[in-house]
Image (tube, helix red, strand yellow):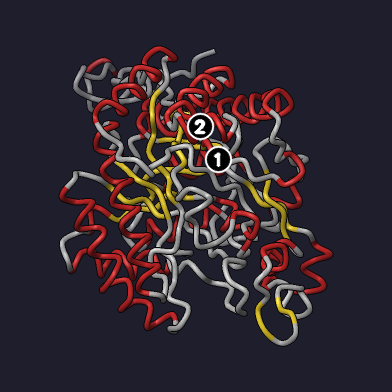
Amino acid sequence: MLPVREADPRVAGGRAEPSQTDEYNRTVTVRAFEPKFMKVGVLTAALQELTPRDVRDTDPDRAIEDWIQFARELGADTIQLSAAPHPTEADVPPAAMLDPVANTLDLRRPFDAARARRVGQALGAAGLGLSDIGYFDNMLHENPAIRSKKHAFMLRVFDAAVLLGVDAVCGFVGRNQSHSMDENLHDFEDHFVPLLKEARTRGLIYRVEPCPMPGWTTGDSFHNNIAYTPGTWIALHRMCEKHGVGDQFRIHYDPSHAILMGQDSRSIFQYLRETGYHFLIGGFHVKGQVINGRGVAAWGYGGQTIERGDWKNGRPSTRSDDQLNAWKKQTVLAEHELPGTARHDPLAYLQNRTVDWLDHQLAARELLELDVANTHLVVEHEYPKARIQDRERLKPILQGSIAFIRRIDEAAACMYALQHEVLPAQDVPTQGTGREPYRS
């Protein structure tokens, strides 16, 4: 039953004029329910040897065509094309790396317009897009000759990106191991800013994945990619602005690295917003991290510091299998998650020991400055126990993870549209508090 209105003595007969507002005659702007979804893709390093090596070495773009077809079968919208030096040219042996390395984009031969057309035709036939190209290497290597080689390869990646019509390249900054972290700011200015200037001339953005890369070397440093956390992102961006390349430096956010350092996405996004840098994140790797409480009890978040096995007879081992043990700085306390494969654990969310995927996607919309419909969610498969180099066995696993992320993003989009657009337009409040930043 509608409430009985009291007569307004200021209006004859108790009837309000149309210009006056109350709960009966105010104008309510009805907002349509229009959720905006992100684009879901997959990094082609998920299956390094999809195309047999003897086939792809003689016909390098066959690997890309095969991956495009595979991604279509997985239900992806896009692929992130993995580039890396050929295994015969790498300075770090693939066997010494924790995570998959793939030269799906083979750049031993120049990537020219004819090769780009072939890739473009394959993408068009499959109805897929290309989010960006990923080349993950140490751009601040302390050895000038090695650093120069990596930079030359990165420039070839830039040129391939232009020919393929994408606007971004994804990679690391890295670290000069012979210098302190503060000294690395100067290394960034001297050696990385010139790369960003090259990106600017090509109309490209460089999106940095913020992994600290603790096992990248056999030394004791945990932070081997200096762009690993918001504090350093902001310091580096300020330096970029000084040199006119601020628009080229962005972050390809990956929540697994935040979890590794005891952080959570909502707090990171809130911090960026409060400091005026909520524009910095331009894309996402969707990869989780599951923290092992027993490992934390033994070693803390700094990881294993002694008797790892990467040193032999008082010096770093030259054997790849031994060098892999340097990653115990991370693996004793954490394991990568392929989204959807870890058990649902609300207590772990509260302790920042795994990713709350729904809140991750909701917080991104609430706190960051994003063009949501043109933002990429790239599934990066690094769950060790499911790292299967068998197409048919891996296929349903990746299908399930991609489907999971798509549904999570759709749910977050619906929540955001309902709570932040539809309800406010009709003066209806949302309920409760939700997850708060800085609270654990």
285 lies above or below 77: below
**Is residue 207 visible from the viewing direction of this image?**
yes
Q: Position of residue 356 (x, y in %)?
A: 63, 44
Q: Quadrant of residue 391?
A: top right
Which of 382 and 319 lies nearest the eye of the viewer? Answer: 319
Q: Position of residue 242 (x, y in %)?
A: 18, 69
328 lies above or below 374: below
Which of 31 and 319 lies nearest the eye of the viewer? Answer: 319
Q: Position of residue 194 (x, y in %)?
A: 22, 64
Please name the residue that numbered disc 2 is placed on.
Answer: 56
Q: Is residue 384 left or right of residue 34?
A: right
Classify 10 Å Cα crowding around label 2: few (below 14), some (14-19), many (20 and above).
some
| Label 1: element kind | helix
Which of 127 and 391 lies nearest the eye of the viewer? Answer: 391
Which residue does the image show at 55% across and 44% down from the upper left? 360
**How many labels sit on residues?**
2
Classify 10 Å Cα crowding around label 1: few (below 14), some (14-19), many (20 and above).
many
Q: Position of residue 364 (x, y in %)?
A: 46, 43
**Is residue 417 visible from the viewing direction of this image?**
no
The amino acid at mark 1 is Ala
Please name the residue that numbered disc 1 is placed on.
Answer: 45
The amino acid at mark 2 is Arg
The numbered mark, 1 or 2, whose residue comes first in the sequence reads 1
Question: Mark number for residue 17?
Answer: none
309 lies above or below 290: below
Q: Indicate the quadrant containing the C terminus: top left, top right, bottom left or bottom right.
A: bottom right
| Label 2: element kind | helix
357 lies above or below 409: below
- What separation in Å lies between label 1 and label 2 (alpha carbons)? 15 Å
Which of 197 and 367 lies nearest the eye of the viewer? Answer: 197
Q: Indicate the quadrant containing the N terminus: top left, top right, bottom left or bottom right.
A: top right
